[in-house]
């Protein structure tokens, strides 16, 4: 997540350097051609790039809005994970007999492991990294054979809670209530995976790029009478406006990609760890995960 | 689902070849007529195609957004099927006595059959294809008389779970909790069928095509003074921009049509199979369903 | 619901014939006046109709989107009725003792009656039509005194299920689960009634028509220099673009009006009947309700 | 709620008479000044009002859409009240022993009182008006000390139902199911209050008015060369287009204001009364609340 | 929340004074340069600022809509807190035995403390301010060690209710129903925290400012022929239109920032206090929290 700090200009310019270069080449080329073959190339009414600009702005505003929705949905999913994690621990404390305090802690810690493991999985990183802090050897070994580590962790918790019910430490009805929270975790995990694995319709991006280049070509012909000393920068500024918007949207639309615009899952998982440990009356809680310069990861 | 791979240009061009041909013919015809009957056909102010362009962009942005919503809703429905399938198996394991391990497996396998059969039904393919891998002869025969095979499979699972309750292997309250998950499956099945069976308002597509052709005619008259060597390509580029957007939207809006832009239901159902089998501690799980070139089906 | 079949041109043109006639009259009148009193009527800059065009496109895109949302919500409501109807029968079979098989069938048939009666009520048709196929004389008589027939049918089912509970054929907790499904039916009925009874803000339609006529007047003055042989068709095409969009939106926004653009409630209710009868293992099921030419009702 | 009847022109014109007057004054003033000081005031390119028109249309389409959402949400809330009121009575009849028929009626009548009282409160009218028709003296007195009368009525019903449970006329589990419906009433009441008490961001309205006047000034300077006999009406028509849209949106966004565009809460509450009385098998039900001319209140 | 009262002009102008100053400087500078180096700086077609204006309006309408959604979501979250707070007290009174009247009051008062503390936390103020009015010394001390004070308060209430269940003052099933309301509080707290802690994508704001300045530069070159006495005010008015919209959106998008545009959490929490105390039959209730001039906090 980008913070409200000063974002380095290099971060922004790096995004579109290739596109700007192409526009520069196109601008110079058109400039040369219209100079050389003045009589062959006819006047281009400014209305032509305007029509293409209309198509561009239709796709752009579609893409900006939908990518924001994906990004916001990803954030909402992780917000729900925070809320349900807190409710989960409060439910364990409310419904399971106090004699099982150690098992409550074991389940709660395994849930912290689930949060971190889910974040790592979504970003394509090692899903077992640092999990030994929260779960024991046996658990680690048991989940290693699964394709989907967070799902395996969730199964361990589900089965341990069912065992508590069988041993009489939990009543039937409260068992079902806790089960509803586990169903929420399953839903949240699946929703995040859906956002991760669903590719935003790729054709729109192709068309958008194609239209912007057509726009640049027609605009540069239309502006042929302006001194190239002024025309080229103008072209660059207007086209980079469109490219920057497209790039920003593209980054938002994939919020689990190890990028500065990612949903800050590590920060959130650390906050969940702090919350859960304080609800368990632990004395040692970790510090909030620090931001990396102008963004939080 | 189109992947982030290089999409073949032929795939895109094939979509609009007919429309481009029509525009070419219109362009040449107008060109010939305005040349031949110069004095009869008056000047066309460029504002006229602009007004039509306004109507086009209003419908286009409506259509792009709503078709995306349909596509995204279809994906969400299948995402919910993934989540509820996982929760379903975890609930069977939590609430049904261990002695009935075989029945749990039978129910879980029948649920995998339900996923594949639903996917096939939505796409208009044979809903019984490969189901013998997951259900027995008796089930296959029993569902064959139903119009709606997935619904028949859902009924088999519902009744078997009710029988478990009658035989005391499941408590009343947990029975109801599992029933809520079965209700979710019924909802998800119905939501996918709704998207499949509801035709997007057809008049908008008609109007859009009609307006684009009017746009092409008026624009080509307005550009009569430009050399046809330049004018025709310009017409083709601008009109194909509009046609491409319309086609992309049309493909998104019907996500169960055996097309590369489909929701990847086979891939998803295979993932569910893997998840369920690993939750059941099976040793042999299938490999993820491989993408077909630039798309996953 | 309009189908993907060829829609007769007459269907579309009939919608706007009056408006097109008015525009024709306006165009001819302005043409005559500007010819007659050339010196009195000043030049009209093309920017004036452009400004009005802006206001028109703001309302049009608002109206198209919101009317689609109403139409889609109506379809969703009927989709939920399908889903809950299936779940309802499965719940009756799961929770009510087998000895009461006859009552289950009676309740299920009365529910089919509810679906048809609701569809008829929404369209303003006779809500009792054909109900004798599904419910007995006593029921028919009992509901006839109610203003809201579907609500009366729902009450009959609710009370019969409560009586089953009292007679011990249904446990308390499963009774409540079935009650939740009945609450869903009540909600869906009310949601459809809300869409039916809520008039879309009428002023927007008035303004839209008013602005389109103003647009036509100013545009026809602005185009005074074009030969009327070309100008009048241009006016008709551009204004009919706007009128067609407005009409299409208006039809979508009232989806229970006995029009081809209606939500296909008869088709859906017939499908529910088929589903329910097959879930009840009936041998005779009706055929799907056939479409009427280019639309399904 | 405005009906589909002919809306009096006076109703619409009254809304913007002040704004139209201001525009008239501005138009005449600019006309006089540009005539008097022709050389001092430079040409105004038509692009200037175009830019301002862009800003206006951005805010207008935002405002029209969001105000419609508020209006539609208010209607949905009252739709939910209808649905839950019906379900509430059906639940009372299903779960409370028949011996308590009188108390069921008392609770149901108090609920009707709640509907009317909520409608009156939202509109800022006397929340106790006519309540003596539905509740007894003691209730009336007991709620009079509360700031929020509907909440007090809801508490009375909640406590009476809890007392029924204590006296054994209601089982624990069905008590909780009915309680969920009471929670819905609390939510719906709060949602309507939220719409009532939340002021739509006021700055947008200020800016919109400000921009429209700037638009009028710049446009009237730009049109200086047109005869004022034509220019002033043009200005009035275009600016009134914008003002009318703004006013319509403003009215929709406050749907509980005793205006013709209000959500028709009195009509809806009367329908609830009819439904509830018929579910209770009462013989005397009121007539539907009649519309007042071109609107229903 | 800004009220419908007259908003001081200074409040609005203060927002954009810096930006207006920059525009003034740019305008004067361009004016000087175009005067001095007339032959060097070419004509700027008005179409150039138009293209940039398109990009600006795409981002502006995106930003205005999404920031409104955040603001409205924040308001909805606090609306849900109101509704659930009322339901919570009614549930305590319904389900907990009357003998525990004192504990009910203690829990309800601690809940009021939770509301105020949550509001203070969101705004970055002291979360313990005035809490001594509602909770005792022991509670105050116990929560002081937690990072998240409202969560600690919620835990205290959750555990006290669980203790009531253990002591038999509350039945299992009603315990679970109350627990669902506590889960709602946890969700609402987390949703408000999410809105607070998620930075709106910062790049859009950067691009918007950048594009507006480019717009100003190109527009001022394009208007070079207009007397600077008129040109500069024109530039200021048009650019301030864009800046004001951007600022208004930025303020809405962070609704817990101690600004006049904040969600009025103090007012809402006070209303909850009044509601809860009247439901508890307290005689002394506070007065509604008064607005501060043109806004409520």
Image: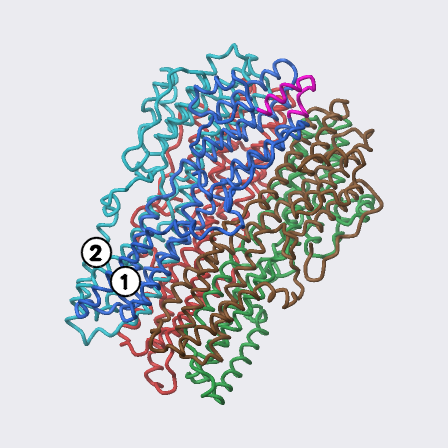
Chain colours: A brown, B blue, C cyan, D red, E green
Q: Confirm whether the magenta stretch covers residue B104.
A: yes
Q: Position of residue C7 (x, y in %)?
A: 28, 42
**Which residue carries the number 2 mark?**
C22
Badge 1 element: helix
Near-viewer residue (B149 or D58) = B149
Start-end of magenta stretch: B92-109
Disc 1 from disc 2: Cα separation: 23 Å
> Which secondary structure is most common in the magenta stretch?
helix
> Where C213 falls versus A83 (above or below)?
below
Near-viewer residue (D214 or E39) = E39
**Which residue carries the number 1 mark?**
B218
Instruction: Give the quarter of the image for residue C284.
Output: top left
> Where A145 falls versus B145 (above or below)?
below
Q: Nearer the viewer, mark 1 or mark 2?
A: 1
Near-viewer residue (B222 or B96) = B222
Q: Position of residue D198 (x, y in %)?
A: 54, 52
Check residue D32 in the rendering and tell me which mark sits there, or answer none.
Answer: none
Q: Residues within 10 Å of mark 2 (few under 14, many from 20)?
A: few
> Where D230 falls versus C248 (above or below)?
below
């Amino acid at each position: 997540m980008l913070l409200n700090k000063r974002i380095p200009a290099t971060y922004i310019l790096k995004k579109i350097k290739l596109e700007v270069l192409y526009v520069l080449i196109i601008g110079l080329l058109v400039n040369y051609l219209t100079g050389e073959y003045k009589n062959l190339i006819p006047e281009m009414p400014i209305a032509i790039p305007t029509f293409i600009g209309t198509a561009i702005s239709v796709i752009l505003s579609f893409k900006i809005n939908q990518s924001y929705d994906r990004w916001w949905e990803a954030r909402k999913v992780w917000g729900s994970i925070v809320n349900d994690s807190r409710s989960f621990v409060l439910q364990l404390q409310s419904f399971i007999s106090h004699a099982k305090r150690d098992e409550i802690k074991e389940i709660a810690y395994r849930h912290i492991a689930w949060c971190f493991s889910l974040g790592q999985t979504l970003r394509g990183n090692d899903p077992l990294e640092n999990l030994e802090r929260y779960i024991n050897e046996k658990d680690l070994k048991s989940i290693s054979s699964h394709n989907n580590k967070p799902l395996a962790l969730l199964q361990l918790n589900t089965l341990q809670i069912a065992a508590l019910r069988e041993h009489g430490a939990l009543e039937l009805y409260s068992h079902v209530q806790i089960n509803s929270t586990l169903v929420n975790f399953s839903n949240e995990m699946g929703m995040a995976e859906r956002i991760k694995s669903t590719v935003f319709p790729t054709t729109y991006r192709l068309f958008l790029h194609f239209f912007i280049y057509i726009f640049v070509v027609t605009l540069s012909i239309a502006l042929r009478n302006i001194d190239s000393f002024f025309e080229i920068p103008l072209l660059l500024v207007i086209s980079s406006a469109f490219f920057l918007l497209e790039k920003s949207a593209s980054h938002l639309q994939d919020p689990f990609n190890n990028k500065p615009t990612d949903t800050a899952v590590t920060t959130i998982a650390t906050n969940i760890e702090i919350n859960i440990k304080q609800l368990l009356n632990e004395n040692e809680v970790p510090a909030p995960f620090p931001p990396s310069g102008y963004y939080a990861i």
